[in-house]
Structures are given as C-alpha cells and as structure tokens.
Image (cartoon, coloured by chain):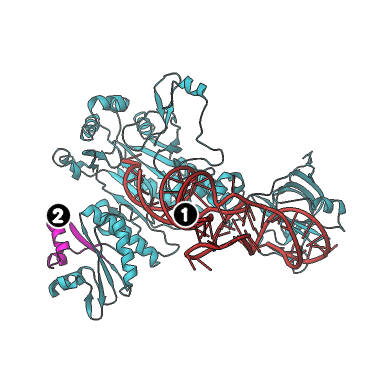
Amino acid sequence: MEVPIEALGDWERTHDCGTLGADYIGQRVLLMGWVWRRRDHGGVIFIDLRDRYGITQIVFNPQHDSAALQKADQLRSEFVIAVEGVVESRPEGMINSKLPTGAIEVNCDQLRTLNTSPTPPFLIEDEIDAGEEIRLKYRYLDLRRPRIQQNLLLRHQAYRAVRNLLDEQKFIEIETPILTKSTPEGARDYLVPSRVHPGHFFALPQSPQTYKQLLMIAGYDRYFQIVKCFRDEDLRADRQPEFTQIDIEMSFVREDQVMDVAERLTRSLFAKLGKINLPDPFPRLTYHEAMDRFGSDKPDMRFALELVDASVGARASEFKVFRSVLEDGGEVKGINVKGCNSFSRGKIDGLIAFAQDLGAKGLSWIKHTDNGLESSIVKFFPEAAQTLLIKALDSEPGDLLLFVADQPAMVARVLGALRLELAQRLELIPADSWTPLWVTEFPLLERDEEAGRFTAMHHPFTSPMEEDLPLMDSDPGAVRARAYDLVLNGNEIAGGSVRIFQRPVQARLFELLAIGKEEAEAKFGFLLEALEYGAPPHGGIAFGFDRLIALLTGEDSIRDIIAFPKTNKASGLMENAPSAVDNTQLRDLGIRLA
RNA sequence: GGGGGCGUAGUUCAGCUGGUUAGAACGUCGGCUUGUCACGCCGAAGGUCGCGGGUUCGAGUCCCGUCGUUCCCGCCA
C-alpha cells in the first residue's frame, strides 16, 4: 500500500536529533529526520530518528496518541518524517548509555511523513559490510552514515582552521584559473577543448605552480589557496584524479621560513583536530640519508629496522654474488630482523619472492643462532667476514639477517619495501604514534634512462642549492635542490621548494631538461618574461589535503574523506562519468572521434 | 602498461576433487508482540552464479576472452 506523503506545512524544526537530554524533559519539541530503525512491539512502536547530529528515540504509545501510532505502523527505513511530541525521561532501567540522547525519548502525538524511500540497497550504519561499488553507486546513501558525516565535518573544520591560521599570519587566499595551459613535464594533463579556438585545448591545473609564482612577482608576498588539482595518472588508495591541495607561497624567504609555516600549520591542525601533539621542531633528514638508512624518500620513522651497509663483510667473503655486484659498483646492504631466526623456510621463501617481485635478483639470508651464523651461504664467509657482518648489523643470536646486493637504487627499493612489509607482519608499528619528518636536499634532476635525458625531480622551477651551482655544468645529476618534503608516518603530506627567481638560472635549467629555447618560450615564455620584471626570491609548499584528512580521521582510503570520489579507473559510479557526448557538442568543438 | 584479490539472493558471504533440488546470515514481506534500542517469536518470498565463448554426458566450480571493482608495481614535475 502506498504510504501518503504529507506536506511540511508550517512546521518548523525546534531541535536536532543529537541534543535532547534530561534538561529538556517536559518540553514540546519538533524533530525532523530519517527513520533509522523501527521496533514494533504491537502496542508500542519505537523509531530511532536520525539526522547528522545524532539519533533520538521516538515513542508511539496508544495511551498518548493512538492516531500517531497507527501512522507509525507504516514507517520504513529512510522515510523522512517530522514528529512533534513531549520530551520524557525513559522509564527506570531503560536508559541507553550508548546514545548521547539515551536518557530521554520523545513521546510523539503528531507525525508527518514527509517522504518515503525504497528499501535501501545496504544498511545505513557505521560498521558497514557493503562493498565500495554499491556504496559509490548510491553515494548519497553512503554519505548518510555517521562515520562519513564525521569525516566530512572534520574536513570542514580543517578548511576553517587552515584559513584562520594562515590569515592570522597575513596570508591571503587568491583563486587561480582552472582552465589553464598544458605543461610539458609532470603528470598527464586533463584537457578541455576550446570551442572558440578549434584545435586548441585548456589543461586543468596539476597545481597552481606558475600562477602562485606570478603572484609573488606581483607582490602578494604571502599567498595561499585550498585548491583542486588534476592529474591524469593511474590511481591508488591515496590518489584521486582530482584532489585538494593547501597551496602556499611566500616571498623574501629561505626554505627555513616556509618549513616553519608548514610545521606550525601541521602541528596546529593535529593538535586542534586530532588532539595529537607533534614534536617541535620536526626532525630532518637529507634525501641521501633517508635513502641510505631507510631505502625511501618518505621513510616511516615509527620503527627502526634500518638498512645497514654490509659491503665490508661482503668484500671479505668469497661469495661470488656479492663480490661481483661490488665490482660492478653496486652495494650490499642488509637489515637485521631482530629475534626472527625461527622464520620457517616457507616464510623466508615468501620474503624472497616479495623481493624478486620488486625487481631484486635475489634475497640472501643468514640466521644467527647460538651456534653462530647459519645458512647456505655462510660457507663462503670466513670467520673474519662473519665477524664483520655481525658487527655491521649489530647481530646477536636469535636474529635473522637479510641481504640485497645490487645497484644502490634497487637495493633501496627492495630493502625499503621489505622494511615496511616486515614492520607490518611483525607488528612493529606502534599504535597512536605520530612521527613527522622533513626530507631535504633532494636531487634537482633525475635521469630518465628511457628518454636519455634529465627530468626535474620536483618541478622545473625548483632552485638548485647555491653551493652546487658549479656542478650544473660538470655533474648535473649531483646538483641538490632547495626542495623539501614533509613526511608523516611514511606518508608524503607536503612538498615544496625555494624557486628559481632569476631568468638566466631558469633558462639554464630548461636547457638541462632538454627543453629547447623555442619550446621554453612557447610553454613558459610568460613566466620567463615575468622573471625579468623584478621577481623577488620566493618559495612555497603544497599539502596533500586529502591525505592529511585521511590521517586525521584514521581512514585508509582517501575515498572515505571525499564526498564524491572516483574509482580506481577514474569513473564516477553514481553519475556515470565520464560518458559519451552528442555529436553536436563534438562538432562545436571541432573534434572527430577516431 | 604489468601483477594479485574479488564478482553467487537486496547486502555480506559459503558452496570441497565438476554431479543432478545453489545454502547461511542480515535485510525485505506477512502474522504475533505495550518498553525495545542490532527488540523478540512464527512463517514466506527472493538467484541471468558479472558477461561471452570453450572443454565435458554434465560447469557456480575447469580453460580462454571480456567487463567491473579493489590492492600493488610502473606512472604520479
């Protein structure tokens, strides 16, 4: 039977579903919300009424109003209703301590059914067991879940806090274009065809990088923006095609001042929104040291399990695998997995497979027992070599030693990943531990072996370190950049740099990047020209806002802190985007599909 | 671009070495129920086993392809 829908009329909500308590007993109230759960006891019906503030129990009691009770019989999950009634204390022993409003209930005498709902495809509750596919298709239902609503509330509070904090420090928020110009380096661009200029395209910004530099040249010496950025690359749990940055740029500063602003912002956000006290100051590590000790440029510092150079011990051995790698300019490094010499053969084989999947040729292992070192390769290690290994890895009986021999990049890659994997398996990561870290002195350039040229590791506007300027000609790969990343628990949450503000330096860098004069002029001519007109020294940083919120809410996926996220293949399951368009639209744009 | 997981009732899943009637829980519907709050009790309905092809006497199960989703590598200045 169709349930009739009633008009709202002149009814006005007096309270929300999260605030009523013992103080309100005796008051007449009018609540509106969604039917969360209905419990029918024949004579009496309970409704849990839900809005984004909470849940309030509504009672329909024949002694109070039998007409309302009859109507309540028709209510189903997710119907929208308005109820008027009296706040009453619950009978003796019926208080629900799990609900903030659990001391009271609203005894209803007036009920309006404002809208009905089909049975929802999944239950609207926090401990949801529905898959992501169905949740994303019915995102508006998923968004009704209190947990997601709390996430978005925290996100809102973060926007506010960021704006307030930066405003207090004289930063001003300025919007930059979303329809902008395609750039040659970096991620793949999302393109937008121009109708007025057939065959020409806008790009959606990967970041407002050039605009914020131009704002510095324009004299807005402290800029920020909470801004959408777009990158057409493959996705991950912490990567969406459109994502939000807190973008910051400052003039007349060195890296220290930018880092100070970023640190204070981060500390303040975590204190305010997460009740988490971060250290002051954040520790720093150079890129070189991070790679050397942790095999990563964003090391998780919540646990040790450091990488150790075992080359001396390897060199003293007769183990050909190690020796030939060393002769080829490679290295041998190991990690000491404390107290794990009881790992089964199968477990170790699993680690070897893990290493090989990452590209390692192999993974050597040695068990340190009470009888000394044991493994199939120990026979190649004379006692002196064994002593060197034990000393290098600070090994003692009970330990398991793992080694990778390869070129430094591969050693870092494999042992860095193995370090994280082992920490997870051995549960070495303490809960509620928050360890931020600055990584500094990144290389300016990265060798792209396929293309046979250098690319900018950060971006092509990053300033080289002054003392490395002479290397620009002799050894470009060794030039360090004035770039810095902020890492928290192994997540890169912000990255920035001091920029080039002198045209000749910028032109030289474009040269190194094999961006020809003509191309540089076509792509970045406006910036190069602007640099000539009194560009101040400047630098900045950008936070990955979504990752920040995910950390603060404890969500593993940034999809749970974005209202309408895309899937791994960058589609919107609810609105079914992207989709085909009319031929007339294409014709207007001068586009013919292949 | 590559690798792994998943796809069976509205939802989450089970379904063994291929075997004839594909199950459970939750949800839904009906009945009962005046103090529940994940209410309870009784009963019922509900299936294109993602899609296409193949192997087979026989396929949810095996094989190939494809689509979707997810995790990872590459990629993401």
Q: Is residue A323 magenta?
A: yes
Residues at marks 1 and 2, CA–CA distance in whole angstroms: 40 Å
Task: Identify by letter the chain in red.
Answer: B
Query: On the rendered structure, is B55 left or right of A32?
Result: left
Among the two numbered marks 1 and 2 on one chain, the one whose residue lies closer to the N terminus:
2
Crowding at mark 1 (Cα within 10 Å: few <14, some 14-19, many 20+):
few
In which quadrant of the rendered view does residue A350 lie?
bottom left
Query: On the rendered structure, is A289 left or right of A37?
Result: left
Relative vertical location of residue A531 with respect to residue B73 in this rendering, above or below: above
Establish whether labels 1 and 2 are both on one chain. yes
Question: Chain for mark 2?
Answer: A
Q: Under tag 1, what secondary structure?
A: loop
Q: Is residue A315 magenta?
A: yes
Which residue shows up at 31% across the image and 40% down it?
A: A253
Question: Chain for mark 1?
Answer: A
In which quadrant of the rendered view does residue A60 lie?
bottom right
Q: What residue type is labelled 2?
A: Gly
Relative vertical location of residue B77 with respect to residue A376 in this rendering, above or below: above
Which residue shows up at 44% across the image and 58% down it?
A: A277
Q: Which amino acid does label 1 sit on?
A: Asp
Residue B17, how many percent across, how many down? Answer: 47, 64
The residue under label 1 is A556
Is residue A465 in sight in this rendering? Answer: yes
Q: Under tag 2, what secondary structure?
A: loop
Colour assigned to chain A in the rendering is cyan
Which residue shows up at 43% across the image and 42% down it?
A: A246
The residue under label 2 is A329
Residues rendered magenta in the picture: A307-335
Residue A254, how many percent across, how many down? Answer: 30, 42
